[in-house]
Amino acid sequence: MRDGSAVSVRLQGPVGGSARCPGSSGSTWLKGRASECYPLINPFWHENANITDSHRQLLYMHGTFVILMPLSLILMIFGGMTGFISILARAYLLLLMTGLLFLFGALVTLTGISVYIAYSAAAFQEAVCLLRSKDLLVEIDIRFGWSLALVWISFVAEVLTGAVFLLAARVVGLKRQREQAL
């Protein structure tokens, strides 16, 4: 494999030594009962890698949410800029497009959240299969933490912002119709 495309992880037992796996940087370790090396693979390069289908699916899911979440942020920033301009200009079409942009960003965020949660569950199942241990649940504590809570808050804020811009577009459109009728 290319340089930087894989990092080996040593699973060491409670009594086992601390020898490094071949090719490992020594910075990533996973404590477990086995004494085997498992590679951590770059999610954006795995054409010729010798990996299982379940690993490939995990890599696709990881690559998907790694792309979706920054895309959502880019859409929010772009939506904020167009929203500011559309509020100043009071342009119906620009307000409408900004509202739709925020709703599309919310959809991207929701997709990223869903893929991340599915990825976490699949990664845990893969870890159970690799370690071949049913009492793994006692040793591993899985929590999503504050980052997932912030993403949910971001999703709700994007939906509300999109709805407000659509409402503003409706108000501007009705105001124009009244002015044209007079």
Image (spheres, grey):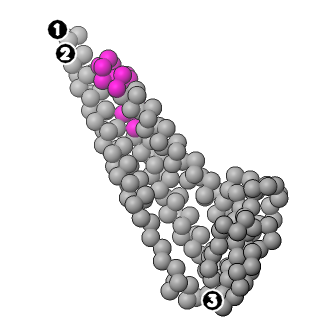
Where does the image place residue 42, in percent across and percent down from the top left? 70, 57
| Residue lying at the far bottom of the rendered structure | 15
- Please indicate whether residue 141 sits to the left or right of residue 161 in the image: right
Disc 1, SS: loop
Establish if 162 lies above or below 32. above
Query: How many numbered badges does the structure rendering display?
Result: 3
The residue carrying mark 2 is 178
Q: Are marks 1 and 2 in contact (CB under 8 Å)?
A: yes
Residue under numbered circle 3: 14
Does dot 2 land on a helix, a strand or a loop? helix
Question: Is 150 in the magenta?
Answer: no
Please identify the quarter of the rendering in which residue 177 is found. Answer: top left
Magenta stretch in the rendered image: 84-102
Nearest to the observer: residue 178 or residue 41 = 41
Examine the rendering and report whether any part of residue 39 can be seen: no
Q: Residue at x 79, y 67 (%)?
A: 23
Quadrant of the image containing the N terminus:
bottom right
Callout 1 crowding tier (Cα within 10 Å): few <14, some 14–19, many ≥20: few
Q: Residues within 10 Å of mark 2 (few under 14, many from 20)?
A: few
Disc 3 marks a residue whose amino acid type is: Pro
Which numbered disc covers residue 182? 1
Q: Main secondary structure of the magenta part?
A: helix
Instruction: Please tell me which of labels 3 and 2 falls first in the chain.
Output: 3
- Name the residue: 57% across, 74% down: 124
Q: Amino acid at mark 1?
A: Leu
- Residue 85 vs residue 92, the one in the foreground: 85
Quadrant location of the C terminus in the rendered image = top left
Kind of residue at badge 2: Arg
